[in-house]
């Protein structure tokens, strides 16, 4: 049974841990608000691009339109990019995503090349001995230009035939509590990425395009890829800071509860020691009488 000295040491240790987790919770909450605002602000922009893509899809179907980013080939060489965090202490965020990467394996894909964004993903790919084509480091305050380096690398690999398809694994930001690990096909671009189902469109308007729709679509497709990948990185950062804030809050609450339990055990031991001393004194007094 632990002594009062041992319990006192444990209480002090848990209090120190609670102070650290509380500080990390406050820092994560501050970064979380900014990351969430950036992630949510990009959604209307992509929705508008998808809405315009509804009107441009006719260029893919009705006209003799060709573009390297929409070329479909047999999936023999697939590039998979894994977006994770650089640091831990964010709950099961990385574990859930990497489990999806590990379980999502298609036997028909002859060759798979991985690209990592984030230290945790790089360590996982190295530990599982998977072939890596590149590794990118994205800081918290990254810009569109920073994300464009990675998306441009993916487009170049797809255009020159090094890969036949590109998929992205990342944590989609839903809200502060929920982050969903998903896989989204990025290349080749098709109906699932350029515009949504016409029946789901809230309103169809007539647009006049200058220059022509095929020429305009050819200019917009590369930018569409850059913007989609940029939004995925924003969602990943928002998911990271949200998960870390929640994890640190849970750790702080658990530490406070542990301090209460240890304090109760300490008081019980001290009361038992006092009672034992009183009994010894009473017994000694009775023996003298």
Image: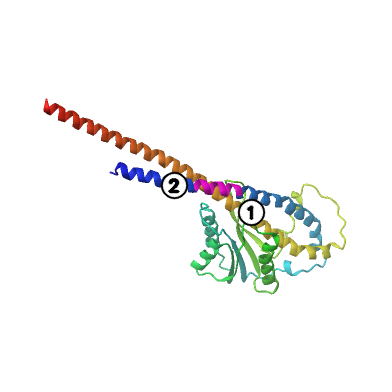
| Residue 218: image location, x then y, percent | 79, 65
Q: Which residue is mark 2?
A: 16
The residue under the point 26% across, 36% down is: 273
Circle number at residue 192:
none
Circle number at residue 235:
1
Q: Main secondary structure of the magenta part?
A: helix
Q: Is residue 103 above or below residue 248?
A: below
Among the 4 quarters of the image, the one containing residue 288: top left
Asked whether 231 or 185 is in front, the reply is 231
The residue under the point 78% across, 55% down is: 54
Q: Quadrant of the C terminus?
A: top left
Q: Is residue 280 above or below residue 107?
A: above
Q: Secondary structure at mark 2?
A: helix
Among the 4 quarters of the image, the one containing residue 83: bottom right
266 relative position to 237: left or right: left
Q: Which residues are magenta?
A: 21-30
For the rendered model, the colour scheme is rainbow
Magenta region includes residue 27 = yes
Residue 216 shows up from this direction: yes
Magenta region includes residue 179 = no
């Amino acid at each position: 049974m632990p002594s009062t000295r041992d319990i006192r040491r444990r209480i002090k240790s848990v209090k120190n841990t609670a102070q650290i987790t509380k500080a990390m919770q406050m820092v994560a909450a501050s970064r979380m608000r900014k990351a969430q605002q950036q992630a949510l602000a990009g959604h209307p922009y992509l929705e508008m691009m998808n809405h315009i893509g509804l009107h441009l899809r006719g260029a893919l179907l009705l006209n003799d339109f060709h573009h390297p980013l929409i070329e479909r080939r047999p999936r023999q060489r697939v590039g998979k990019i894994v977006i994770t965090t650089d640091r831990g202490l964010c709950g099961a965020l990385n574990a859930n995503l990497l489990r999806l990467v590990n379980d999502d394996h298609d036997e028909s894909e002859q060759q798979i090349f991985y690209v990592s964004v984030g230290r945790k993903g790089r360590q996982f790919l190295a530990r599982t001995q998977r072939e890596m084509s590149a590794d990118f480091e994205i800081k918290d305050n990254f810009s569109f230009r920073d994300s464009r380096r990675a998306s441009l690398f993916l487009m170049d690999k797809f255009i020159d035939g090094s890969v036949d398809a590109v998929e992205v694994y990342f944590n989609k930001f839903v809200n502060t509590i929920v982050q969903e690990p998903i896989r989204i096909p990025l290349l080749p671009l098709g109906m699932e990425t350029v515009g949504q189902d016409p029946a789901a469109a809230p309103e169809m308007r007539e647009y006049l395009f200058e220059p022509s729709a095929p020429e305009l679509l050819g200019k917009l497709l590369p930018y569409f890829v850059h913007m989609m990948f940029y939004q995925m990185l924003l969602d990943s950062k928002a998911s990271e800071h949200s998960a870390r804030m929640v994890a640190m809050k849970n750790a702080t609450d658990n530490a406070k509860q542990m301090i209460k339990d240890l304090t109760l055990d300490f008081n019980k031991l001290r009361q038992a020691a006092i009672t034992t001393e009183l009994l010894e004194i009473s017994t000694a007094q009775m023996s003298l009488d």
